[in-house]
Structure formats: C-alpha cells, structure tokens
C-alpha cells in the first residue's frame, strides 16, 4: 500500500469514529483557573507583552488524578476517540521528557499522565490520541523563533510520544502556522514533521488545528467551533470540529457551579457535522485534583442517553480531494 492509499484508509477509519472528547489538562488548569487570563498568555506571543506567568513544575499537584474516571465519562457519552493535551502552549510536558526539566519529573505529583491516560482510555475501547503544541512559551518557540536547535527539540519530544507509548492513531498539533501564534510553515515546513511522524508510525494521522488551507498542512481539516470556525455546508471532509460545555477549555474554579451548554445543544452540533464527514469533539476539563466535576460528568451521561451515532461506515466511494498529496 502506497503512502497516499494508507492515508486515505486512515482518514476513513478516523471519520467513522464520529464522536470524541478533547481533554484539556495542563499547567493552565493550575495557573489560570481564576482571574482575567483565559487558558494561556496569548498577549505575550501575539502582542509582545512581557511574560508574567512562567509555570513552576513544582506547582503541578493533581493529588487525586483519575484517568479511569475520565475514560468512563467519555464512554458514557458514547465517545469513540479522545485527545489529551500532552503539551500545551505554555510548554509543560505531562510525561517525563528527556529533553527538558519543564515536565512532570520535577512536579509534586510525578505521574506520567500520558501513560495513565492512554492506558485508561484504551481499556475502555476508546481510540486514544495525543495533542502537542509546537508553540512553546517556556522554550521560546513561536512566531519570532524556531531555530535548528528548537526544531530538533520539537522533533525529539514528538519522537518520545510516538515511540514510548505504543500505537498512537493520531497526533493533534497546534500553535503552528496558526492565527493565534507559533512558527510559520516557512520557518518549520509541515512536510518536515509529517515525514518524521510517518517514519515512526506510518498510520498516525497528523492533524493540525491551526491549518486553514484545506488539507495542505494537515491530514484532517480542523474547525475550532468554540472560536467561531464553522464548516461550510458544501464541505465533504475529512474534518473534525471541537467545542465545549464550559466557558473555557481549561478548568476554572467556578466551573462546578456554572450553567453548562446543554446536551441537546451538543447533539445538534453532531447532527450538523456528521453528514459532512466531520467528527465532533466535546471537551473535558479535569480540575486541579485531576477529577471531573459532577455537573460536567452528568452532562456527558445525558449526551450518551440521547445521541445516536451513525453506524454505516464510509464506503470506498469518497468525495474527491481527500488525499492531499
């Protein structure tokens, strides 16, 4: 099977999953769960403001980390795939990386969250992938800098994720050629990372959240629906859209008492996207203990009670243009 045919088969396999969950759990869960900053220091990357909130790994302390509960919550909603923010824009790695001290090996709770997450979700039969930010504020990788040394650092960390944890069906990358920050594709060509990923795991889809030019810089088109990115009615896939029931991607201290978007709202989103060959991801935001708040858990259970996922797999007669190269 040549590379294009392999890609097509993996695209179909992913779209057949339909419903997934996006788990935002990283340094922002501790840093920005109150106050004016939401999720990450956007102004530092995009407007040159002084960075004010470097994260101390010693502050990483999810004392009741419960990835099994995350997986059961996702399963209750009928989710078939998942992604975890193994490293977000701040740069903290949820695995004991050999290439930086800015990771869980220097935390109060040193648990390899990537390993725990993958084991829990695989045990529930959920196709578990990972999210990795190319934009990295701690290691100064962004719009203004992506040196040869920084490129190698990116490649080293991706290689760790793709060699130490078994089969990874997809790697979602972010902060790369995107409006909200990260190196441009001129600074770091998409093909350079795609070739690396495929050389390690040929069946791993590279899904770029920041790509807005069809399938040129991604294996699956991504729509951050929570940021207002809608799918054109004539889009034929393959795509994935993501949104959240809470106000922000990462946990906020008032989330347990917040009014969430309704399960019916989420199901209507699915009904819009699935006929367009676009999957839907609904966010889970564990709290600082590493657990899911009761109101969010209940909302996922209610979704599972009303959602009816398409059972018919995609045929070989797919819309033209799915293979990008």
Image (cartoon, helix red, strand yellow):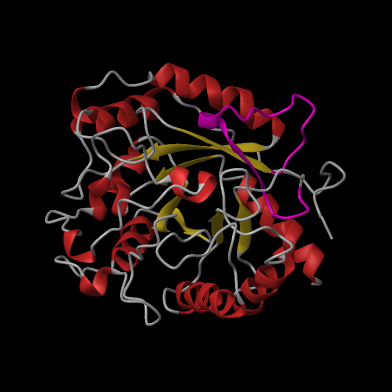
Question: Considering the image in quadrants, where does the N terminus appear?
Answer: bottom right
Q: Which is nearer the eye, 6 or 63?
A: 63
Residue 294, position as x, y percentages in the image: 19, 32
Q: Where does the image place residue 129, in percent across and percent down from the top left?
A: 48, 58
Which residue is rendered at x = 24% and y = 74% of the image? Answer: 105
Q: Is residue 237 magenta?
A: yes
Which residue occupies the extreme right position in the image?
A: 320
What is the number of callouts on the image? Answer: 0
- What type of secondary structure mainly makes up the magenta span? loop
Please tell me whether residue 161 is drawn above or below residue 237 in the rendered image: below
Q: Quadrant of residue 292?
A: top left
Query: As drawn, is 143 to the left or to the right of 43?
Result: right
Quarter containing the C terminus:
bottom right
| Residue 304 percent coordinates (x, y) | 38, 30
Q: Percent from the top left, x then y, of residue 187? A: 69, 65
Give the residue drawn at x 67%, y 49%.
220
Q: Is residue 138 or residue 290 the one in the foreground?
A: 138
Q: Nearer the viewer, residue 15 or 160?
A: 160
Report the magenta residues as a range: 215-238
Residue located at (39% from left, 26% from top): 303
Is 162 drawn above or below residue 291 in the view shown? below
In the picture provided, is 255 more to the left or to the right than 147? left
Tell me where residue 314 sits by quadrant. top right
The image shows residue 279, relative to residue 263, as above or below, that is below
Magenta-span inclusion, residue 268: no
């Amino acid at each position: 099977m040549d590379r294009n045919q392999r890609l097509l088969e993996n695209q179909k396999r992913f779209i057949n999953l339909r419903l997934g969950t996006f788990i935002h759990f990283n340094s922002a869960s501790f840093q920005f769960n109150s106050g004016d900053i939401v999720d990450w220091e956007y102004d530092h990357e995009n407007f040159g403001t002084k960075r004010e909130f470097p994260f101390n790994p010693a502050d990483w302390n999810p004392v009741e980390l419960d990835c099994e509960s995350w997986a059961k919550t996702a399963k209750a909603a009928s989710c078939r795939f998942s992604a975890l923010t193994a490293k977000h824009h701040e740069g903290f790695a949820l695995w004991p990386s050999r290439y930086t001290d800015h990771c869980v090996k220097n935390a109060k709770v040193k648990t390899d969250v990537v390993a725990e997450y993958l084991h829990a979700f695989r045990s529930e039969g959920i196709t578990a992938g990972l999210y990795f930010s190319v934009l990295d504020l701690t290691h100064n990788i962004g719009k203004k800098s992506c040196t040869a040394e920084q490129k190698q650092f990116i490649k080293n960390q991706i290689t760790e994720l793709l060699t130490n944890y078994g089969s990874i069906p997809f790697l979602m990358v972010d902060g790369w050629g995107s409006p909200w920050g990260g190196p441009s594709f001129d600074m770091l060509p998409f093909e350079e990372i795609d070739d690396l990923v495929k050389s390690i795991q040929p069946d791993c889809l590279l899904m770029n959240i920041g790509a807005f030019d069809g399938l040129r810089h991604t294996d699956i088109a991504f729509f951050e629906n929570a940021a207002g990115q809608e799918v054109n009615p004539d889009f034929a896939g393959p795509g994935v859209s993501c949104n959240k029931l809470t106000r922000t991607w990462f946990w906020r201290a008032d989330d347990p008492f917040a009014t969430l978007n309704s399960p019916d709202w989420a199901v209507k989103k699915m009904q819009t996207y699935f006929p367009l060959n676009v999957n839907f991801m609904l966010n889970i935001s564990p709290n600082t203990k590493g657990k899911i708040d009761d109101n969010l858990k209940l909302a996922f259970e209610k979704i599972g009670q009303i959602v009816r996922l398409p059972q018919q797999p995609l045929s070989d007669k797919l819309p033209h243009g799915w293979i990008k190269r």
